[in-house]
Amino acid sequence: IYEIVFNDMLRSNVVIDNFDWAFDISRNKDDKFGQYYDVLMSNQNFVTDRPSLFDDTMSDKNAELMKELFDRLTINSATEEQAKLVKEYTDYRNFMSYDIIITDKHGARSKLSDISREKSGGETQTPFYVVIAASFDQIVRISSRQRNSCCLVMFDEAFNNMDESRIQSMVQYFNNLSIQPVIVSPTNRSRSIIPYVQTIIPLTKSRNRIIPLPWKEIDE
């Protein structure tokens, strides 16, 4: 469900280079983890009915597979190898693969993992900033339902491979989110950022010291 909410937010907020963006979560292609993903995803009633992993709703093959995993994880062993195995199989992230689906204005779809080596630095940096910012924004939105939340996100040497148009689009995108970005950028990139921020703190280096200069508020 978080993937659906996350992608709805991306579609409604991101307009960069006329591309649509979506986060893709799928089965790990490595059967070492992927086979367990298949078992868990084929039994959606785990969440609602909370059956045992070994009850009659599972096929004999799947039940045997899960029993084998359970036995491996519960071996009474204090070896480094056993600790590594437990850590691997108790981290849910290892059971899935993650990618970014990019759709152009003509509807052609491509995966970032397939095209990242062919694209320029700016084109590969753009999805990084889009997804990182969106991820933090999603955390804030979920947390705000339970308590007042604030999310300070710092980007150091931001947008160093992006052109002016992409930088401006990215900062405008940040302004539509619930996060508070702190963007550290060299002077030549700052010119593209300044029109879209509220506070500027110039920094200068003197020998081995970084000195903040008087700051000013930018009228909206």
Image (spheres, grey):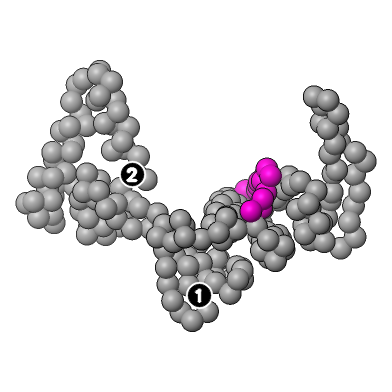
Give whichever of 126, 58 is nearer the camera. Answer: 126
The answer to whether residue 188 is visible is yes
Q: Please tell me in which quadrant of the rendered image residue 4 appears.
A: bottom left
Residue count near mark 2 (Cα–Cα under 10 Å), binned few <14, some 14–19, many ≥20: some
Instruction: Look at 52% across and 79% down and name the residue there.
Output: 105
Instruction: Look at 90% across and 52% down and name the residue there.
Output: 217
Instruction: Look at 51% across and 61% down and name the residue there.
Output: 119
Residue 6 in percent (x, y) is at 50, 61
The secondary structure type at the circle numbered 2 is helix
Q: Mark 1 points at which residue?
A: 104
Relative to 211, does residue 176 appear above or below in the rendering? Answer: below
Relative to 176, does residue 94 appear above or below in the rendering? Answer: above
Amino acid, disc 2 = Asn
Residue 42 in percent (x, y) is at 22, 59
Instruction: Look at 54% across and 72% down and name the residue there.
Output: 19
Magenta stretch, overall SS: loop
Bounds of the magenta segment: 145-161
Q: Please tell me in which quadrant of the rendered image residue 11 appears.
A: bottom right
Residue count near mark 1 (Cα–Cα under 10 Å), binned few <14, some 14–19, many ≥20: few
Residue mark closest to the camera, 2 vs 1: 1
Amino acid, disc 1 = Asp
The answer to whether residue 4 is visible is no
- The extreme left residue here reads 60
